[in-house]
Image (cartoon, rainbow, N blue to C red):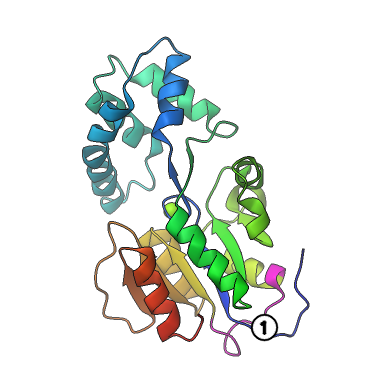
Amino acid sequence: MRYNAGISQPVITFDAGQTLIELDLDFLATRLGERGLSVEVAALSAAMPAAWAHYDALVAQGTGHPWRDFMAHLLQGAAVPEPTPHVEWLWEQQPTRNLFRRPIPPMLAVAQELAAAGARIAVLSNSEGRLVELLTEIAIAPMFPVIVDSGRLGIEKPDPRIFAHTLRELGSAGPPDVIPIHIGDSWSADIVGARRSGWRAIWYGRNADAVHDPEIASAHSADDVRAALRRWGAL
Ligand SMILES: [Mg+2]
């Protein structure tokens, strides 16, 4: 569905991974079971903080988004012996068996409230080209009239062209008539991309620090996100 052009409702876009959906440890344990590995979900869960810290350190060094390093660290932390071939297999399977498939209900509730209030909402994600299929599989695709997947478009955040493409899909005038708001967990992809595009940004998640830019809000919870949206008149 596309909106009619020329209308100036608020525009709010959501990143997918770690914003609307997160790593599904039950699904990961099941997949490892298919490899003959018996791994407790509790062990994976206990290994998560260290794996994310490792990931964050690599991202901070400019290593991009080291999916495989994160997964290797996670499996190692859960005492999986020789994780490398399993990680390679999971990575090969990721396009069709995406491990980041657990919905984050409080954030989906925010999206629902925005839609009910008349805002135009979209998913704007750096993904592998099968995001629509994944969001359909986990039954959240119908909430979003527009789903933009970098893997399909061939343009990734923070490139302003993917933000501009999303605005066109939403039929919104964009800046300066409407200042869209993008919500995401990645500083380098989500927040940098939104600001380069003249959008406001809500930096959501465990890494969100206070920022000295009035056009960026930091949010550790869905309620923090709501507060920022209200401050900017979007909710
Ligand atoms: Mg993300």
Observer able to see residue 159 = no
Q: Nearer the viewer, residue 198 or 177?
A: 177
Q: Nearer the viewer, residue 127 or 40?
A: 40
Observer able to see residue 49 = yes
Quarter of the image with the N terminus is bottom right
Rendered location of residue 149, percent (x, y)? 61, 52
Q: Any atom of ligand 1 within 8 Å of the CB at mark 1?
A: no
Residue located at (39% from left, 38% from top): 67
Q: Is residue 61 magenta?
A: no
Residue 33, compared with residue 161, is above or below; it is: above
Specify start and end residues of the magenta stretch as a single range: 169-179
Rendered location of residue 73, percent (x, y)? 27, 31
Q: Please give the residue where the numbered disc 1 appears in the rendered image.
A: 173
Residue located at (43% from left, 59% from top): 106
Residue 118, compared with residue 84, is above or below; it is: below
Rendered location of residue 196, percent (x, y)? 47, 74
On screen, residue 37 versus residue 139, left or right, reads left
On screen, residue 125 versus residue 28, left or right, reads right
Extreme bottom residue here?
177
Residue located at (56% from left, 31% from top): 97
Please tell me whether the stretch drawn in magenta is mainly helix, strand or loop.
loop
Secondary structure of residue under mark 1: loop
Tell me the quarter of the picture where residue 123 sits.
Answer: bottom right
Residue located at (48% from left, 29% from top): 91
What amino acid type is highlighted by mark number 1?
Ala
Rendered location of residue 193, percent (x, y)? 47, 67
Residue 120, compared with residue 214, is above or below; it is: above
**10 Å crowding of disc 1: few (<14), some (14-19), many (20+):** some
Extreme top residue here?
36
Q: Is residue 177 magenta?
A: yes
